[in-house]
Amino acid sequence: MATLEHSAGGKPGPANKVITLILRIGLAIVIPATAFFILIQGFLFLRAGDAPRWVTVLVAILWGVIGVGALYYIFNWLVEMLPTEWTERLQPFVFIGPAVALMIWFLALPALRTFWISLFGKNGPPALPLTLLLTAPNEFFATLSSQFVGLSNYVAVFTDRLMAGAFRNNILFWMGIATPLTVVSGLLIAVLADRSRFERVAKSLIFMPMAISFVGASVIWNFIYEVKPAGSEQIGLLNAIVTALGGQPHGWTTYTAISPWNNLFLVIIVLWLQAGYSMVMFSAAIKGVPEEIMEAARVDGATELQVFLRIMIPYIMGTIITVTTTIIIFTLKIFDVVIVMTGGQFGTDVIATQFYRQSFVARNAGFGSAIAIVLLLAVIPVMIYNLRQFREQEAF
Amino acid sequence: MESGRSQKTINAILVNGVLALIVIIWLIPVIGLLVSSFRERFDIQTTGWWRVLPHRDWVQTETINPREIGLDPTGPMTVNGVTATFEEMRKGVESGGTRLIWIGNRRIGNIQIQEQRWIVGGSNFTLDNYRQVLEGKNIEIKQGDGTVETVRGDDFTGALLNSLAITIPSTVIPILIAAFAAYGFAWIRFPGRRTMFILVVALLVVPLQVALVPVLRDFAQIKLNGTFLAMWLAHTGFGLPLATYLLFNYIRTLPRETLESAFIDGASHFTIFLRLILPLSVPALASFAIFQFLWVWNDYLVALILLGSAPENRVVTMRLANIVGDRGQDWHLLTAGAFITMVLPLTVFFSLQRYFVRGLMSGSVKG
């Protein structure tokens, strides 16, 4: 017994080396396996959902957060057990792999798959087992092409009457009116706040709607637009003001007689929500305009308006472009406000509500996917701009 | 000099006045919602919420039964020296600070004599709306006239818990994954690094609409639809490009020397990441965390599509939208419900605004 211990402590024999190796491999299998087992048990527990709600919620939060941390830890531990050369080769993929894999699964591949679906009819491409391609390729392609419609979904997107209304609203009201309105109001408020002693408070309060959900904002504004029959007291602020001034009360967003201008009442909601964003961006940009240049211009007799137009605007042009682009992208996908306020009726349909209705209500996968691809095409210029900016950076 | 100073004062008053006006306009919608959520159901339905402010209103001083004093509503009637027809009285006839008004129909109505008075307070406030919205069971609510009504609650408490269960992991998980990736991109050299980062930049503005149908199909295949996990995965996937991009831009700027000295001490990438980079990146992590938190908490579209099949897992935005759809006139529920959904994001927003603004500045355009 003693001699054995002695030899084990002194110079490790080949038997010990083997044992250590086996132990290591064993650990490398057992620990991840246990971890996965625990994670799967947690998932099954959550999916069953039998426990009281708050227990489920607590377990869900812990399971999700600790689970991801544990996975990283285990994979890194496995990689670091390998020879140094392999550690160096594989470690980047432990760090970057999950992020890239998720982005590919949730954004890159879906974009391609949506394009593929958009080339087919109502039900999308038929679900065919890949084995059929090997056993009976003719049948495979015959079934596939029976559903294939080429670009006709795109033709439909651009000729459909409802889509025409949606495009009109997106381009005229959301891009043409809401975007410049938000940019300009944000800029004016920023300039105004910059000259006030109450800048912080004022900015904070105007910025606040950014934290409110579109659904919540829709409730807030629905309440303002609420209409009661003429003659009885109005509980909606707008109609109360209108009737107090001697006008007739209307359900403003549903007021088809002025359609399509009832869209403006939806635009106001988005202005209320987003002006804070543009204000904050401009506020920071304005503070970057050198005071000396503006002072020099004032000394030379320039009016405040001239200083604003000739010095400040050119100076913050970069921010103006960024903010405008951001709001254009945002309004392009406008959905929640419209669906909650009007459900896209009364001539307020937009591209994203049409996409939702075609894809998930009418179950017209091909058509809905074509709309999504049109949305994607619309942001391609911004994507290219971003990539170009990135190439100019020296980070890589 | 003197006129210059007074000009300055006028300017300051003008600037602050206009600014105050804008702030008030911006706040009124929220104040209206908040005040209404504490008013009784009947009050909300019949009078504007601004009635809680001090205002002048007609107050009844006396009621006359026209049949008792022998008035004939089909012709002109004389009350207190004022003569008017039924139609005129219906609208109210004013004379010398008092008003005559016919309440009810022609046959059995009464005439009220009213006086204009200032009304301060006098409104009934209640927490019943919140009780009804928050609780899931049947609850009893006392009406203004003393009767007790049993109504079904809307179980916002359950929806709030669901929202938390979805939002917290959907915020933490992408931050963790993105921080690892950002560190990898910034500090480890490996083949394919540039290509992968180009992917991140390209995906920044991809509208998530293009992803919904395929993701829904994948989730249906692995029976994940309607689960919290599905929401975490989807929000993580959709939020990762922005998270990685923001964190990369920040981590890249950390001083190289700290890292190099740690390497010389024999620390591994993992240790450096955990012990050095994560603590140093807290401002950037916080920026993105607020972004993602608000985005997930306020999200409606993704929840609608991925949770639509599981009513018990519905989140607050869906609950609220459901009430708008089913009972759009029930303002006592809508106002309280809307305010409940707003409390948490507003708290987070006001306490961590600094980081939120910083996130916006570093170019957060989400697809």
Image (spheres, rainbow, N blue to C red):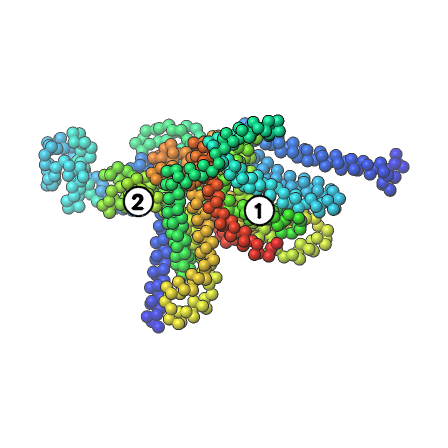
Q: Can you say whether B362 is above or below A20 in the image? A: below
Q: Residue at x 73, y 51 (%)?
A: B266
Q: Position of residue B95 (x, y in %)?
A: 14, 44
Q: Are marks 1 and 2 on the same chain?
A: no
Q: Position of residue B197 (x, y in %)?
A: 59, 48
Which quadrant holds residue B13? bottom left
Give, as a three-letter code, the residue at label 1.
Leu
User: Residues at badges 1 and 2 in contact (C-beta under 8 Å)?
Assistant: no
Q: Position of residue A34 (x, y in %)?
A: 68, 33
Label tally: 2
Provide the chain ID for the residue under circle 1: B
Q: Which residue corresponds to mark 1?
A: B199
Which quadrant holds residue A71? top right
In the picture, the disc for residue A238 is 2
Task: Determine the residue located farthest toward the front in the rendered image.
Answer: A138
Provide the chain ID for the residue under circle 2: A
Q: Residue at x 35, y 50 (%)?
A: B25
Q: Nearer the viewer, residue A313 or B113?
A: A313
Q: Residue at x 53, y 47 (%)?
A: B204
Q: Can you say whether A257 is above or below A143 in the image? A: below
Q: Position of residue A180 (x, y in %)?
A: 39, 52
Q: In front: mark 1 or mark 2?
A: 1
Task: Please tell me whether mark 2 sits on a helix, a strand or a loop.
Answer: helix
Give, as a three-letter code, the residue at label 2.
Leu
Q: Can you say whether A307 is above or below B117 in the image? A: below
Q: Residue at x 48, y 41 (%)?
A: A373
Using the numbered discs, state the Cα–Cα distance from disc 1 to disc 2 in whole angstroms: 48 Å
